[in-house]
Amino acid sequence: MPALATSLHPFPNNPILRTKPYFPNFSSTIPFGFSASSSSYPINSNSSLSFVAPLEAILFDIDGTLCDSDPLHFYAFRDMLQEIGFNDGSPIDEDFFINNISGKHNEELCRVLLPDWEFEKAMNFMVDKEALFRRLAAEQLEPISGLENLCKWVEDLGLKRAAVTNAPRSNAELLISMLNLQDFFEVIVLAEECARPKPFPDPYLKALNALKVAPNHTFVFEDSVSGIKAANGAGMAAVGMATRNPEKMLLDAGATLVIKDYNEPKLWENLERVVKEKLPL
């Protein structure tokens, strides 16, 4: 796999030469005219994406959005935190993971989980955790159902697309490679290469700038509260992916609508409506 592109250096993307994505069955800087806003984008009252027409681009988170990776992160954190005596040696549960870990950047997790540790030591713990995650992912990663069909739809329409993630480079490279999406994404934005990670809008603003698209003609697929807040802060609608996080939590964060996977009829009804619209509502 070629080295992962930085957020402002798009992947070369030739739709004629590009091979179709393959999903195996696994065993187990701000755009011109736009600025960041501290307020959430008021979009979840109508549960419709029609107001983004005409659609120019779709942005994707990676973990929990392209693939069902949250359980693997949970297992890695559960085992490693128990080893160091976190929570008096009792293993964390899924509720703790959802409310305190999911969607957060590793630097923030150092402060949340290991506030008494020196930062360098805490970051080394996170590095080891990510290595364990990658070992698990290499054996058990599963794509979100319907992703292949959605990718084909995006390509057929010639929409611009980017992946925007809080994950470290090594994780992003592994997951995108395993899903064979290296040629699908025109741009990859890594939060670690931005001034601030999600929930700040910086990563999504950088993606908009790199693709040269308008936020009101772009929407985002996200599975976490921090990701939805980042998308809204960048002026974009977000479709929440309730792969692991509760639907209400995602709606309360500002998702326009929430789906379980990419096969849901309400998603395709919205996509068809957006394509038919010639002007924003």
Image (tube, rainbow, N blue to C red):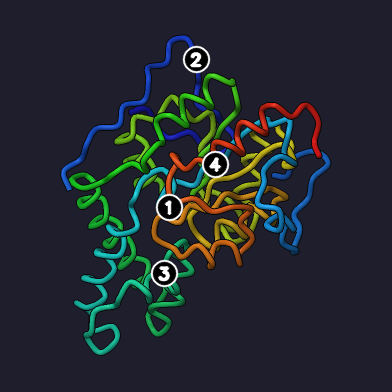
Task: Please state the horizontal and vertical placement of residue 215, each as a whole percent of the image.
Answer: 72, 42
Decide which of tag 2 and tag 1 comes sooner along the chain. Answer: 2
* Neighbourhood count class around disc 3 (C-alpha, 10 Å): few under 14, some 14–19, many 20 upward: some
In the figure, is residue 191 to the left or right of 80? right
Name which residue type carries label 2: Asn
Structural distance between the alpha carbons of marks 2 and 3: 38 Å
Please tell me whether residue 281 is drawn above or below residue 202 in the rendered image.
Answer: above
Contact, CB < 8 Å: mark 4 with mark 1? no
Structural distance between the alpha carbons of marks 3 and 4: 24 Å
Contact, CB < 8 Å: mark 3 with mark 1? no
Question: What number is the disc on residue 167?
Answer: 1
Decide which of tag 4 and tag 2 comes sooner along the chain. Answer: 2
Contact, CB < 8 Å: mark 2 with mark 1? no
- Which of the two discs, 4 and 2, sits closer to the camera? 4
- Which of the two discs, 3 and 1, sits closer to the camera? 3
Please tell me whether residue 241 is drawn above or below residue 110 in the rendered image.
Answer: above
Circle 3 sits on which residue?
Answer: 98
Structural distance between the alpha carbons of marks 4 and 2: 27 Å
Disc 1, SS:
loop
Please tell me whether residue 216 is drawn above or below residue 103 in the rendered image.
Answer: above
Name which residue type carries label 1: Ala
The quadrant the C terminus occupies is: top right
Question: What number is the disc on residue 267?
Answer: 4
* Neighbourhood count class around disc 4 (C-alpha, 10 Å): few under 14, some 14–19, many 20 upward: some
Name which residue type carries label 4: Leu
Task: Please state the horizontal and vertical placement of residue 128, each as a whole percent of the image.
Answer: 26, 61
Name which residue type carries label 3: Ile
